[in-house]
Amino acid sequence: MFDNRINLEKKLLSERRKFKSEATILEEVKAIFEANEVARNQIRNTLKNKSQTKAHQLSLDLLETDKIFHLDQIKTICIDYRLRFLDSHLFKNTIPEEAITKIRMMEENHNTKLDGFKIVAPSKAFHLLNYDDPLLFLPLGNDYYYLVHKWGTEINATRKLLVLPIKNLWNFTIFSVLISVLLTLLIPTNNLSKSVPLAPAIIFLFSFKSIFATLGYYFFMMGKNFNEEIWQRQYYNN
């Protein structure tokens, strides 16, 4: 019986032999890989080096609108969750290869070289200077940034609540007041109120002064500062 089936792989191999030798094809593929690796190394170096670039002229048609953010929106997230928004050269952890690939694709699609990258991450993820889970952004200009890549684990939802007392001075004061009220309620004042007028108020004021001073001293002596003050600072103790 006549078999009219065709092995397409063998046909392709036959056509390839007419086109170029295997050695030539391997050399060309090797050159492509090497060129790609050179470009990827250039991107890695760009991420590690300080840049003054503040904006890029990119094709708007190729950008995803849900990845464009204003600095005010980034600032809000950083303050709420006590994160830093700093240049990529300060980032001490490894930037994943997937991020390098996305940057490489953007450079090819927009026919340009990209730099000036910034990263949103907790303080411990950066090489912070002594004054004596991350988002990679690209500046677009006018305080707009493009989210290139996100990696790592999700930030714990409780982080926002845990850092709420040190969001700003107002929150710090309210937190001290609440602790003072709780402490006042725990102290029995029935007998004391008979001999000392307004005893609960006096105890509250004493507690508030002590707690505010103690927490403030410990907080600032540890080189800490409020979320609103540090979100763009590259110093760990200021």
Image: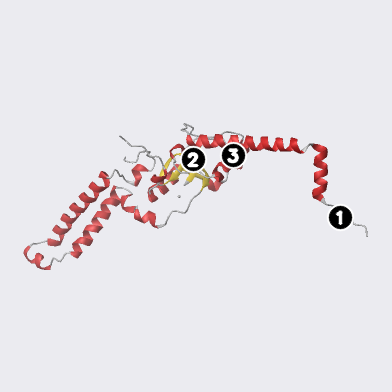
- Earlier along the polypeptide chain: callout 2 or callout 3? 3
Label 2's element?
A: strand
Label 3's element?
A: helix
Q: Is residue 74 visible?
A: yes
The residue that mark 2 highlights is 144
Q: Residue at x 54, y 48 (%)?
A: 66
Q: Residue at x 86, y 55 (%)?
A: 5
Judged left or right of residue 82, residue 55 is: right
Tell which residue pokes out farthest to the front in this image. Answer: 23
Image quarter hosting the N terminus? bottom right
Per the model, the C-alpha gap separating discs 1 and 3 is 42 Å
- Earlier along the polypeptide chain: callout 2 or callout 1? 1
The answer to whether residue 156 is above or below residue 15 is below
Q: Residue at x 36, y 37 (%)?
A: 129
Per the model, the C-alpha gap separating discs 2 and 3 is 21 Å
Q: Amino acid at mark 2?
A: Tyr
Could you tell me residue 48's position as x and y percent?
A: 48, 36
The residue that mark 3 highlights is 104
Image quarter hosting the C terminus? top left
Judged left or right of residue 113, residue 214 is: left
Badge 2 vs badge 1, beta-carbon distance below 8 Å? no
Could you tell me residue 122's position as x and y percent?
A: 40, 47
Could you tell me residue 194's position as x and y percent?
A: 8, 66
Judged left or right of residue 21, residue 50 is: left
Q: Residue at x 67, y 34 (%)?
A: 31
Per the model, the C-alpha gap separating discs 2 and 1 is 59 Å
- Residue 5: numbered disc: 1
Could you tell me residue 224's position as x and y percent?
A: 30, 45
- Earlier along the polypeptide chain: callout 1 or callout 3? 1
